[in-house]
Every structure is written in structure tokens, then in C-alpha cells.
Image (spheres, rainbow, N blue to C red):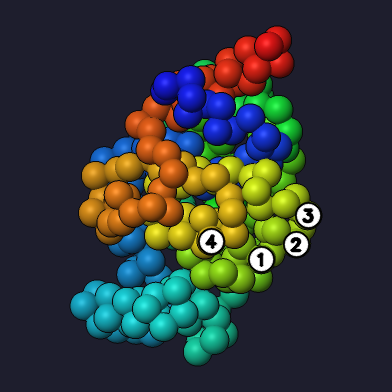
Amino acid sequence: MHSSHALAFADIDLWIFDLDNTLYPYPPGLWAQIDGRMGGFISDLLSIDAVEARRVQKDYFLRYGLTVRGLMKHHGVAAGDFLAHVHDVDLSPIAPNPALGHAIAALPGRCVIHTNSDQAHVSRVLARLDIDPALFAAVYDIEGTGFEPKPGPRAYDHVAAAEGTAPTRAAMFEDSARNLLEPHRRGMRTVLLPTQCDIASAGKNDPHIHFITNDLTDFLTGIVEARKLGGQA
Ligand SMILES: [Mg+2]
């Protein structure tokens, strides 16, 4: 990263990280596993075949922004049961990345996670990554945000209310471009980690994406270095 980019983060003291596909890239097949388990849960719950389960899942996702909300509202499903089922996947293909943990640890200020997944999944992923969960002052998961998923504004309201930091002093890191629209509107600094997924990357050239990086560790290290130099000047 060019040092002038790093200087754009000179006054940031709240660092908000998405989890999946941001702190680590989805290993091939992992998303398909999670997606398949959502379908399987619905299929079993409603005694319908996979095609019909898929239709229900899409319908709830489109109507409520989150499959689990439709299941809670229409079928009285306990969110924890659904989330535990869909995230019961093999995370062993996720490579440990302690260097990223060191880069996060060096950031001045608070680091938090804001994810549409749940706390148990966050814990399992961080353990796989070999990143100390204590580096994050808070984890805002889908339960903690009142089942209001990103990119909806209420998801960000929950985090903003809990943190109390001026949005202009916060930076958000995401693999989904649309999840950065609301942070940009609020005055946050936005960083996109582009992926192969067309849906996530749609809009990556729009003005609400302030920075793009393929290497989060390098990007964060650049910020810390620039702030050290700034402090000496
Ligand atoms: Mg993500």
C-alpha cells in the first residue's frame, strides 16, 4: 500500500472487521457446504425436497435479508439451532494466519468483529486461524445485532450504539461491497477485500469503496507503520 493511503487512517481508533471471507478466504467448497446445510435443515424441518427447500430459503433470504429470520417468524425455529446446524462444517481447510493476528494486535484503538454469522462460528474460525479472540474487544454477531443483518442500516445502528465512537473515526473491512454502502454513508472509512464471488464484488468500483486490498495483513501493517512515522514527524 502507498503510504499516502495509510495516512488516510491516521485518525481511526475503531477497527471493524467482517469475519467470513475477510479475516480468511473461504476455502474452496466451504460456502457450498454451509449453503447445503441450510437447505438440509429446511428440508428436514418442513419435510420437503431439496428443490422446494431451496425455494423457501431464497424466499426468506430475499424477504428478510436472512434465512433464519424467516424460519423464526414462520416456523418458530430457535435461531441457535439453525445457526449451529449450518455452521457445523469442516473448517480444517482454513489455514492458520498468526501474522494477521499480530497485525491486528498492533492497531491503535479498539478492534471488533461485525458478522452476520454467530458467536460460536467466530470462535471456531479464530481458533483455526490461530488468532487470539482477546484481540477483539467485542464481537457483534447476528444475535447481538437483534437478527438485523448487514447490509441493512439497523445492523450498523446496533454496533454504533454499543461502541459510541464517531463513525468518522471508524474503519470497516469487508469482502461484500454492498455491506460497505451504509458505513460509507455514515462517514466511516471503507476497505474491500475483493473475492471471486461476483455477488460480493458487485459495486467494487463504486465511490463507497475507499480502498481495496488483497492482503489484509500488509494493508494493516502499512497503516501502523505510517502512524508511527507520523508520530515522529
Ligand atoms: Mg464476509
Please provide percent x and percent y for residue 44: 38, 76
Q: Earlier in the sequence, mark 4 or mark 1?
A: 1
Discs 3, 2 touching: Cβ within 8 Å: yes
Outermost front residue: 233
Report which residue position mark 3 lands on: 164
Discs 3, 1 touching: Cβ within 8 Å: no
Image-quadrant location for residue 110 = top right
Residue 185 is tagged as 4
Mark 4 neighbour class, 10 Å CA radius: few under 14, some 14 to 19, many 20 or more: few
Mark 3 neighbour class, 10 Å CA radius: few under 14, some 14 to 19, many 20 or more: few
Outermost top residue: 232
Q: What element carries label 3?
A: loop
Task: Point out the frontmost of discs 4 and 2.
Answer: 4
Above or below, 30 against 53 in this view is: above
Could you say which is closer to the camera, residue 111 or residue 19? Answer: 111
Distance between the Cα atoms at labels 4 and 1?
12 Å
Residue 161 is tagged as 2
Q: Quadrant of the N terminus?
A: top left
Q: Is mark 2 on a helix, strand or loop?
A: helix
Could you say which is closer to the camera, residue 178 or residue 90? Answer: 178
Residue 157 is tagged as 1
Taking the image as shown, residue 184 lies to the left or right of residue 134, namely left
